[in-house]
Amino acid sequence: MEGEVTALQENFETKPRLIMNRWSVASLLLLIVVLVFSCKKEEDNNDDDVIDPTPDTGVKFDLAQVPYAKLSDYRFFSGDIKDMLPNARVLPYEPITPLFSDYAHKKRFVWMPEGVSATYTSDHQIFSFPDGAVLIKNFYYDHVLPNDERRIVETRLIYKKDGEWFFADYTWNEEQTDATFSLEGDNVEIDWIDDDGQEKFVNFRIPSEVECLTCHKANMAPVPIAPKPQNLNNDFQYADGLKNQLEKWQDVGYLSGDIPENIVTTVDWKDSAQPIDLRVRSYLDANCGHCHNSAGHCNYRGLRLVFDETDVDSKLGICIVPDLPINAQITHIIARSNPLRSAMFYRMNTNEANFMMPMLGRSMVHEEGVALLEQYIESLTPVCP
């Protein structure tokens, strides 16, 4: 470097018209270095993968741009996305009795923009949500073979925009690094070891947009199903401790206004300490009530399987002859004391496409749910005439 500088100095000294000293030469060299590095920095800044020096780690949810192409674009989760660790203001929740989905585990979250909140409508209706609210439901299996690992299959979103609800479904890749938007529907084969140590197989159905609407609708308009006071009025183990879910929603600003102190609440269908009729009605509400109500897909049927139904016996189908015959053995929708003569028991205990109930959302028989219904029917007396 010193030799090059000296050569430059001697060169300039042989040209009297250029009056430059060693400091001028050094300044020139410094200018060249600055220009070179400036150009290099400009090239770097044109790189699409440049890292923001002050990245925004909060949720990204622009109603003008959603649905995004990838689940990671929303920033619902912090750290490794497959760990499903909620980002700031992404609040976990869980209904008291959940919907059965081929034994898949689920992690549910809710997120709302700053400054808005949901309000109470009634014990048995979904909250009145603001625009920008989004419900997030992840479906996954543990102990998936052959590597005995967790496999997230899909993440479903339902979000509110301009007063209406919209679906966005994301299918996870095999590497579990992200999920891609699609409303076309798909099937994913899963071999896994269940919670009882038994090996099981399912051809898990990821629903299409039409399938989503079949279950998630009221008077033909898309709606959520689970976030009702009756389903969330219980304690949940949050990261900062155990708390009633409705109170937690209020604490974080997701629920405002007057909330009744005494809410008619569903029960955990697995809780044997609860009356069996409440367990069955809670189970049917979660698994069948979204269709069998006055605004649902099966509103033309006489069954009303929502938890707030007051005319329980007739609307549950007890000693009611079914609209559509199944076989000569089936005499009633629910035949007191006799599961084998009950259409509801038959429909829940089969995978035949023409008879199974629910008709969407499962491909496997929920053996434990069927056992509960069987126990309930056997407890009913007297037998139907």
Image: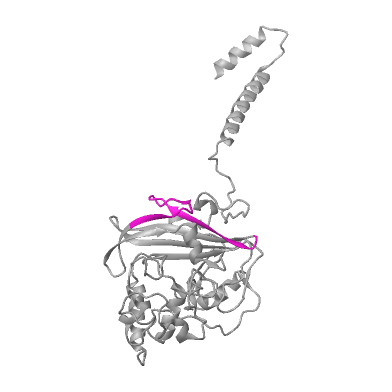
Q: For residue 295, which quarter of the picture? A: bottom right
User: Which residue in the rendered view is the most extreme toward the left?
Assistant: 198
Examine the rendering and report whether any part of residue 266 can be seen.
yes
Question: Can residue 244 be seen here?
Answer: no
Residue 168: x and y, percent?
Answer: 52, 56
Tell me the quadrant of the picture where the N terminus can be found.
top right
72 left or right, relative to 206: right
Residue 268, located in which quarter of the rendered image?
bottom left
Q: Residue at x 41, y 67 (%)?
A: 359
**Residue 261, placed above or below residue 159:** below
Look at the picture and state if 26 lies above or below 361: above
Give the left or right position of residue 12, taking residue 365 as reference: right
Task: Return the x and y of residue 263 as percentages of the image width and height.
Answer: 56, 83
Residue closest to the eye, 285 or 252: 285
Q: Residue at x 55, y 36 (%)?
A: 47
Tell which of 339 and 118 is nearer to you: 339
Is residue 282 part of the magenta span, yes or no?
Answer: no
Q: How many marks?
A: 0
Task: State the quadrant of the C terminus.
Answer: bottom left
Q: How is the image coloured?
A: one colour
State the extent of the magenta-drawn residues as a range: 162-189
Residue at image position (61%, 54%) is: 62
- Residue 330, percent across and down? 33, 79
Residue 179 is covered by the magenta coloring: yes
Q: Nearer the viewer, residue 136 or 324?
A: 324
In the rendered image, which quarter is residue 196 located in? bottom left
Residue placed furthest toward the bottom: 382
Front-lying residue, 153 or 35: 153
